[in-house]
Amino acid sequence: MPDPISWYALGRDVNDPQTILEAVDEKILAHNLDPSAHGQSDEAVYNHRISQLLDHVNYSIYNIKLHPETRPIKAFVDAGGAAEFSKIQDAISYVHALGGGRIFVKAGTYYPKDDVTLYSDIQIEGEDRDTVIFDFEDAVYGFEAVGTTGTHLRNIKLDNIQITQSAKWEDGCILFNYVDDADIVNCKFYDNFHSGESAYSPVVIANCTEINIKGNYWSQSKGVTVANGGSKINIEDNYFYNFNAGAISVNAATLVVIRHNYFDTTGDDAVSLAWNKIVFDGNIFINCTGGCVNIEDDNNIITNNVFVGNVSEPTGIWSNSNVTGCVITNNRFVGLFGYAIILNSGGIHTIANNIATESLTGLQLESGCNYCSVTGNVFVDCDDPIINYGTGNQLAGNVT
């Protein structure tokens, strides 16, 4: 049977010295040198070449020149220089110029020499909050996102990073001012202290809407300060350790929810509610040494919280302001408290179904704290279960 591939089939002369493999090589070379090879508009590879969406597995092509605007992560940062950027601000500026996106920060210690400026549509994600450390070296710098009254910044996220030694005690180690739709999650704040002013650097949320602060850890730093207006602020599942004062302070913000946070070893004014209609729900205090929750405005809801006292005789919930219309229900006070609950002037509160054991005073209503409903509380093994100096207060169904 004749060879199906022969010089006869190829139309070559029998005396042609060129071998078949040489002929094949010639055809392949001509093909490779043809600039239009496999690039015609009716061929699949043409559409692949011009596509803005890569069809490769995420991160399999590590090339800043290859359509960076389509990458799930727009920039990588590495303190040792093994990524595209070694400074976070350079990466932020680059991604901002692309219209925004995610920045991934590798483990390492970074030393910003100025404020880290954030823009809209910037999400910074660290590899691990214990190993991605932004150390401001006791300088008055921090992260800041600052919009204007007419033009708010939006869609900003800080995730899984640590901030330490920020001495920016007035504006905070993080400042969000005129910012909407932003998240601070899974971050760590450690040793942010300004020795010259004897003040700690908080996270400051001012004039902001829809801010989520969740799953963070604070120690030897001030916590969260919400001020100067704004609404829809959620502070949830955070851990605050070793606070003399100022774990959470809310002033001039509406629709604030503070839920499921853990406060370990706190002093006076651990939580200050200096605005109205705040929900403080399901939080836990242990090793309290001072006042836990200070109510400084009307119509706040303090419910389902657990307070664990000690020999320092702390105060659980108190108000020394003219406050009205608060709901204080289903709280539990365990261990020694000087006062589980003490309220000053104002009144018209609902105080129901709270339990205190071992407190020196379970509930005290000062003169001027009037027309409260006090029902279904249990104050046992308290030296003074209920002290009522007010007028018009209704006490019913309490166990003492």
Image (cartoon, grey):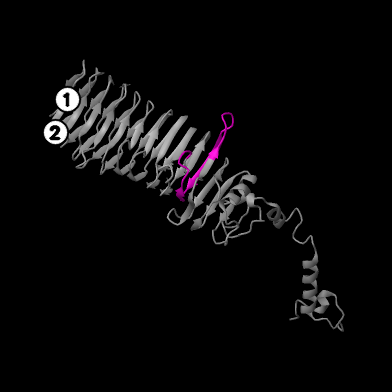
**Label 1, residues with CA under 10 Å away: few <14, some 14-19, many ≥20:** few
Element class at badge 1: strand
Is 146 on the left or on the right of 360, as rendered? right
Q: Is residue 299 above or below residue 203?
A: above
Q: Is residue 245 above or below residue 20?
A: above
Going by the numbered disc 2, the residue's amino acid type is Cys
**Part of the protein shown in magenta:** 145-171
**Label 2, residues with CA under 10 Å away: few <14, some 14-19, many ≥20:** many
Element class at badge 2: loop
Whether residue 230 is visible: no
Q: Is residue 259 above or below residue 137?
A: above
Whole-percent x and y of residue 339?
Answer: 21, 32
Whole-percent x and y of residue 85?
Answer: 59, 56
Residue on which the image places disc 1: 387
Whole-percent x and y of residue 116?
Answer: 55, 46
Is 333 on the left or on the right of 68, as rendered? left
Which one is nearer the viewer's eye here, 31 or 240?
240
Q: Quadrant of residue 258?
A: top left
In the rendered image, the quadrant that contains the N terminus is: bottom right
Residue shown at the point (16%, 26%) measured from the top left: 386
Going by the numbered disc 1, the residue's amino acid type is Ile
Whether residue 79 is visible: yes
Dot 2 or dot 1, earlier in sequence = 2
Measure how far apart labels 2 and 1 are at the Cα level: 11 Å
Is 154 on the left or on the right of 98, as rendered? left
Whole-percent x and y of residue 245?
Answer: 34, 39
Residue shown at the point (35%, 44%) measured from the top left: 240
Residue on which the image places disc 2: 382
Which one is nearer the viewer's eye here, 260 or 369?
369
Whether residue 129 appears in magenta in the rendering, the answer is no
Query: Marks 2 and 1: CB-CB under 8 Å?
Result: no
